[in-house]
Amino acid sequence: MPTQATVIGGSEKLSKKKVYYEGTDMLHTGYALCYNRDYGTASASDINRACRVEKPATANLLWFAGVVVEGYDGVTGPCVVEIAVPSFGLVEAFCEENCTLGTTVLATKDGTYALAETAASDCAMAFQTVDRSSTNGLVLVQLEPIRLS
């Protein structure tokens, strides 16, 4: 009897969601995006705050939405894009850190689509050991909901 769980087909079922990317940059697989929770006027009850995303920035770092999935590599905004949402699934994310499997905790970072080690908004755990400190690239991570303290 096997002692390890095996993922059939080489992938794990991810929770995905289509969102509207407001920016004008070209997006790539694994880019981190954050919700635009201040969309519209502050006094309005605007459901669009649940589906509008933007590049991580100081004002939205606590609102991690997810990472761009494979089929949307190279799209330019504004556009609809599909993301893997934080639901403890494994996915490749764009990263700028030296990562160690099961040890490196990653977060959104101001002004970049890459996940990094910061103290503000943990949203992923590295599930691959790879040095991305000098060359940004994809790293297998487990996406997790941000823990607000």
Image: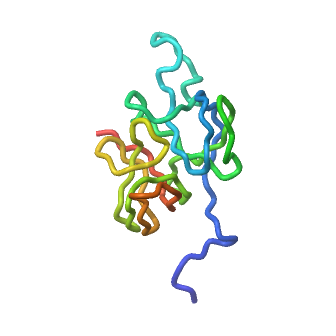
- Count of marks overlaid on the render: 0
Left or right of residue 118: residue 91: right
Q: Position of residue 141 (x, y in %)?
A: 48, 59
- The x, y position of residue 76, in whole percent, is 67, 36
Q: For the point 54% across and 25% down, which residue is it? A: 49
Residue nearest the observer in this picture, 10 or 57:
57
Q: How is the image coloured?
A: rainbow
Q: Position of residue 11 (x, y in %)?
A: 64, 65
Residue at 63% x, 47% y is 16
Placement of 29 over or under 60, stated as above or below: below
Q: Nearer the viewer, residue 32 or 7?
A: 32
Q: Is residue 131 above or below residue 4?
A: above
Q: Is residue 79 left or right of residue 146?
A: right
Q: Is residue 131 above or below residue 94?
A: below
Residue beneath the point at 51% across and 32% down? 35
Q: Quadrant of the C terminus?
A: top left
Rendered-image quadrant of the N terminus? bottom right
Looking at the image, the residue that sits furthest to the front is 134
Task: Check the image and name the residue furthest to the bottom.
Answer: 1
Determine the residue positioned at 48% across, 58% down. 142
- The one of 136 and 123 positioned closer to us in this rendering: 136
Which one is nearer the viewer's eye here, 111 or 20? 111
**Horizontal and vertical percent for residue 19?**
63, 35
